[in-house]
Amino acid sequence: MKIVYQILLLIAALVLTYFIYQSIQRPIEFEKAKKARYESTVEKLKDIRKAQIAYKDVYGQFTGSWDTLINFVAYDSVRNVRKIGELTDSMIEAELSEAKAIEMGLLIRDTIRVSVIDAIFGGSLDANDLKMVPVPGAPTEFHLGATLIVTGSGIKVPVFEAKAHNNVVLNGLNPQLIINLNDRSRTNEKYPGLRVGSLIETVNNSGNWE
């Protein structure tokens, strides 16, 4: 019987050790997975911001439509100034301005149209993938919004926002740790997820990770 008790105590000790190890490893593994998912999601939000800013430069406002933004990135173009030549020391000594040097044919400045994909993203972006949150599981879109905010002086300011909740970004990870993370964000009056831009602030195209 003594041997049986010893074996049972050993098994109990091993089980207890396992649960202690798991309780320590669980938040460590969660943070590791969270960091990786946050990083890939932030990169996508940065691309969305680039696309929105380019869209506003062309059309004077942001868009809250994924179809419109994706079509813009995939098929539209932006103006780009082609520069050939720079002011030399001798030109500066001769008190030549850039405008005068262009007029004399010493410099070339041409405004040309370049596709958004090439000009903004170096030709390496899949426009149709822009709206998708880059996490495993069922495909989920970022929430996209745009509006005009009227300032106290009556000026209409275009703003946009793109965001993904932690429940989406961290889908499939430990549910209780996600709940804890969301609760901390709400306690600190922060959005429980990742977001770029704002629909309530007139000058805010930054991300909440910055």
Image: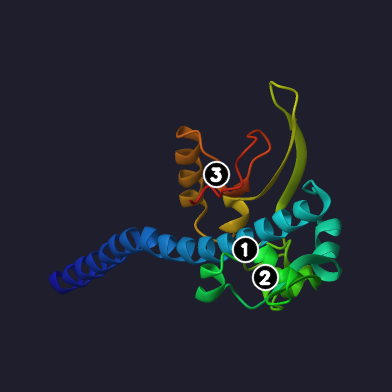
Label 1, label 2: how far apart the Cα atoms are: 6 Å
- The residue at the point 86 percent across, 64 percent down is 71
Give above or below for 210 relative to 28.
above
Callout 3, which amino acid? Pro
Q: Can residue 209 be seen at all in this image of the molecule?
A: yes
Q: Residue furthest left?
A: 2
Label 3, label 2: how far apart the Cα atoms are: 55 Å
* Proximity of marks 1 and 2: CB atoms separated by less than 8 Å: yes
Please identify the quarter of the rendering in which residue 15 is found: bottom left
Judge by depth and name the residue closer to the eye, 170 or 209. 209
Judge by depth and name the residue closer to the eye, 40 or 94. 94
Judge by depth and name the residue closer to the eye, 150 or 69. 150
Q: Nearer the viewer, mark 3 or mark 1?
A: 1
Residue hosting label 3: 192
- The residue at the point 29 percent across, 64 percent down is 21
Callout 1, which amino acid? Ser
Judge by depth and name the residue closer to the eye, 182 or 22. 182
- The image position of residue 96, as x and y in percent, is 61, 66
Decide which of tag 3 and tag 1 comes sooner along the chain.
1
- The image position of residue 12, as x and y in percent, is 25, 64
- The residue at the point 53 percent across, 64 percent down is 37
* Proximity of marks 3 and 2: CB atoms separated by less than 8 Å: no
Q: Residue furthest front?
A: 94
Residue hosting label 2: 101
- The image position of residue 74, as x and y in percent, is 82, 70
- The image position of residue 97, as x and y in percent, is 62, 63
Q: Nearer the viewer, mark 3 or mark 2?
A: 2
Callout 2, which amino acid? Ala
Task: Bin the neighbour count of mark 2 within 10 Å (Cα to Cα): few under 14, some 14-19, many 20 and up.
Answer: some
In the rendered structure, find residue 97 and report the number of the disc placed on it.
1
- In the rendered image, the quadrant that contains the N terminus is bottom left
- The residue at the point 46 percent across, 44 percent down is 180
